[in-house]
Amino acid sequence: MRSLWTSSEATQACGGEAQGSWAANGISIDSRSLSPGDLFIALTDRRDGHDFVSSAFEAGAAAAMVSRRPEGLTRDAALLVVSDTETALRRLALWRRQQMAGKVIAVTGSVGKTSTKEMLRTILQRAGLTHAARGSFNNHWGVPLTLASMPRDTEFAVIEIGMNHPGEIAPLASLTRPHVGIITEIAPAHLAAFDGLETIAREKADIFSGLEDSGIAVFYSGARCMPILEARAQEVGAGEIIRFGFETGDRYRLADVRAVANGTVMKFQRDGWHQCVMLRSFGAHFARNALGAIAAAESVGADPDLAAIALRDWQPPTGRGDVSEISLHPERPPVYLIDDSYNANPVSVAAAIDAMAMRCSTDRQSSGRSVVIMGDMLELGPAEDRLHAELATIPSIKKISVIHCVGPLMKHLHAQLKPDMRGEWRESADGLVAIMGQLLLPGDTVLVKGSKASRLALVVDAIRELHDDSVPPRG
């Protein structure tokens, strides 16, 4: 297998001085997760990566990119010494993107980015060598790291682009130079750094500023501030604008979305062509993301029939709506756990509640309760108290049996719930973990939803540990 980077090629790409002759098969910025043969890049943020170069070599690093020689290294240590490691990483990304002869899709949006990226990976890997980052590598480090890790013969690349502050997306889109840019949805996320939805929409729309000549803009027709997205695509001269969603005029239109025992069936049409897709996940938001993925994939040459078939194999990433069964008693129905604990904002919470209601309305062997465990939504700015309280007005929430809340902000929702629906409230996830055994019964379906920093992953682990015979969902 040809190496990802050689010392001579990396020196050409980003300058600096190579010490020794080496070849790397991957790139890492974390010595704890580094794979043997990786090039370790010593970035500097809250902690200085140079302090971990020795650990990287102990873990099997092929070489290290540094801006100074760390202490404790052997004289023959394989290094690439550059003036600034973050700038050099971007130059590696730029070099590899310029070499790439395949097609690139860039994905952004307030919700659904990672799920859509993973759907695209599932579709495109059937059509050719496909590259996409594992996890949410979508920031000023993650995007160049994904590009720099791309094999030379990649035929399709899917790059997720995120943001926390204004001005982040345009430079990442320029670095990525996508043939297709897709926006999943606009939602009130990161409001602590933005004035409102319109400024978020303008920032997200900047993904179109990096489009290749005649590049294609794809976005959800029901997105908030959708005219801003369309205007930006026209302004940059997109070669084609494709809308997907539920509207009659959408090129890719969802005609029907229904829950079945083991997932969601979506029916859609495109230019008179009708198709039915089975997803092993629950909710109209997953169906919408799948339709956007099909639209983007067909735009780079994938067969839409094969795309629909491929999506039957897709499952949500961990913490983003994946479903498992937990057996509490060998002779009683299992608990159905929906782990959506990675992220949360008002729009994604509403979608998760809708999906929960949809799932619990299906004809299943179990007829237990619908239980929701909700953690704080973060980065919502001055309106955070009100936005938490307003979750009680989600129409489908009335179909939920009981809601338990975690965190100081979720206390506002807890106060608004009807008494027969109001469960426990705890200041932190640890407080709920301590009583988890009292909160669930065999046959319950439980949704765990919150921002990552609310640490609801601890709650998910506690549910799984109620019995060690956890099994994958029936399918």
Image: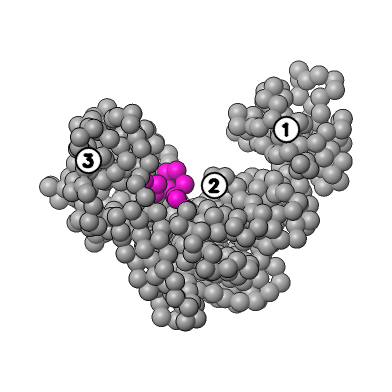
Q: Where is mark 1, residue-wise?
A: 37
Q: Earlier in the sequence, mark 3 or mark 1?
A: 1
The magenta stretch spans which residues?
Answer: 314-323
Secondary structure at badge 2 equals loop
Q: Where is mark 3, residue-wise?
A: 333
Q: Are marks 3 and 1 in contact (CB under 8 Å)?
A: no
Name which residue lies at 28% across and 35% down: 327
**Residue 147 visible in the snapshot:** yes
Left or right position of 451 against 126: left
Secondary structure at badge 3 equals loop
Q: Position of residue 24 (x, y in %)?
A: 76, 37
**In the image, residue 17 lies in the stretch drawn in magenta:** no
Q: Which is in the foreground here, disc 2 or disc 1?
A: 1
Q: Where is mark 2, residue-wise?
A: 136
| For residue 179, above or below residue 94 | below
For badge 2, the amino acid type reads: Ser
Name which residue lies at 33% across and 31% down: 469
Q: Earlier in the sequence, mark 3 or mark 2?
A: 2
| For residue 473, above or below residue 161 | above
Spatial CA span between label 3 and label 1: 47 Å
Q: Are marks 3 and 2 in contact (CB under 8 Å)?
A: no
Q: Position of residue 22 (x, y in %)?
A: 83, 33
Front-most of 161 and 354?
354
**In the image, residue 318 lies in the stretch drawn in magenta:** yes
Q: Earlier in the sequence, mark 2 or mark 1?
A: 1
Q: Position of residue 307 (x, y in %)?
A: 53, 63
> Mark 3 Cα within 10 Å, few/some/many (few <14, many 20+)?
some
Q: Quadrant of the N terminus?
A: top right
Front-most of 447 and 154?
154
Front-most of 384 and 452?
452
